[in-house]
Image (tube, helix red, strand yellow):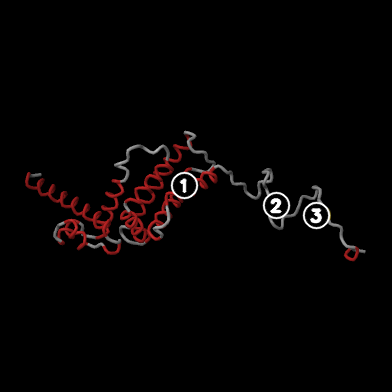
Amino acid sequence: MTDQHAAALEDEQSLAERIVRGAIRAYRLHAFDQVDAAVVADVAGVPLDAVARVFPTWDALLLVTYDRWTQMRGTRRSEAPSCTIEYVRMTLAEDVADPGLVRVLAGVINIAAAETGFAELFRKRFEEYVGQLTTGLQRDFDADGERSVVPADVAATQLLAVYEGLQIQMLVRPHVDVLVEYDRAVRTLRQGWQRREVPSWDLDAPSAVAAPGAVPDAGAPVSPPTVSGRPVVPDATTRSA
């Protein structure tokens, strides 16, 4: 590679970085559906044709912007989270301070759910985040920092549902204190994680309840029906002859 070629490549990389940073600023300033190549070019201070040359498709620019922005999360934290639940809470607090990223995260859901060339790439980002939470929760379970009888991947799915649901609430119901609601929801999650789910067929479980229509064991004693604890005596007119 010649020096001239290397310099040109470096200039192109610098231009791409400038465009991506411009896209981040644009999404912080404008609603998701109001940002296009012209807005990004204006905010980044580059020609419009430069955006199209470096990022031939809009989804390509959006994906790189998404990756760069999410990588920036947590880089300014003064202390490390003590557990995965606290890690997600810190992330949610950063979302409150930087709602532009949440608008992008909500916007790419439509792309991830579509049958386009970039859909699989966006879906992969969601799966990677679930995997990250699963690994973190499993580490917490193993260290006895969290108590759970459910698998870590199930707990991660539930925790992510709470987190992403509150992200949406933050956008459409700005009066809601999502951090307060997160703490409440997490208390409920933790209680649920510690309870073993008893299937209806587990007759040895103390809380087992016979399924509707089940036939009692022929050898088992049958108690007469009661009302307020008192046996019900059939009326004389209803007794069989």
Q: Dot 2: what SS? A: loop
x%, y% of residue 6? 11, 45
Residue for badge 1: 183
Point 27% across, 59% down: residue = 59
Q: Is residue 10 left or right of residue 213?
A: left
The part of the image, by quadrant, that contains residue 166 is: bottom left
Q: Dot 1: what SS? A: helix
- Closer to the chain start, of discs 1 and 3, is 1
Nearest the viewer among 233 and 66 is: 233
The circle on residue 62 is none
Tag 1 near tag 3, CB within 8 Å: no
- Residue type at mark 3 is Thr
Q: Dot 3: what SS? A: strand
- Residue type at mark 1 is Asp
Residue lying furthest right: 241
Structural crowding at the residue carrying mark 1, measured as other residues with C-alpha within 10 Å and reported as few (<14), some (14–19) or many (≥20): some
Tag 2 near tag 1, CB within 8 Å: no
Residue for badge 2: 210
The vertical placement of 75 against 200, above or below, is above
The residues tagged by marks 1 and 3 sit, at their Cα atoms, a distance apart of 44 Å
Residue for badge 3: 226
The vertical placement of 42 against 153, above or below, is below
x%, y% of residue 81? 39, 39
Q: Quadrant of the N terminus?
A: top left
Q: Indicate which label's residue lies in the foreground, 2 or 3.
A: 3
Point 76% across, 52% down: residue = 216
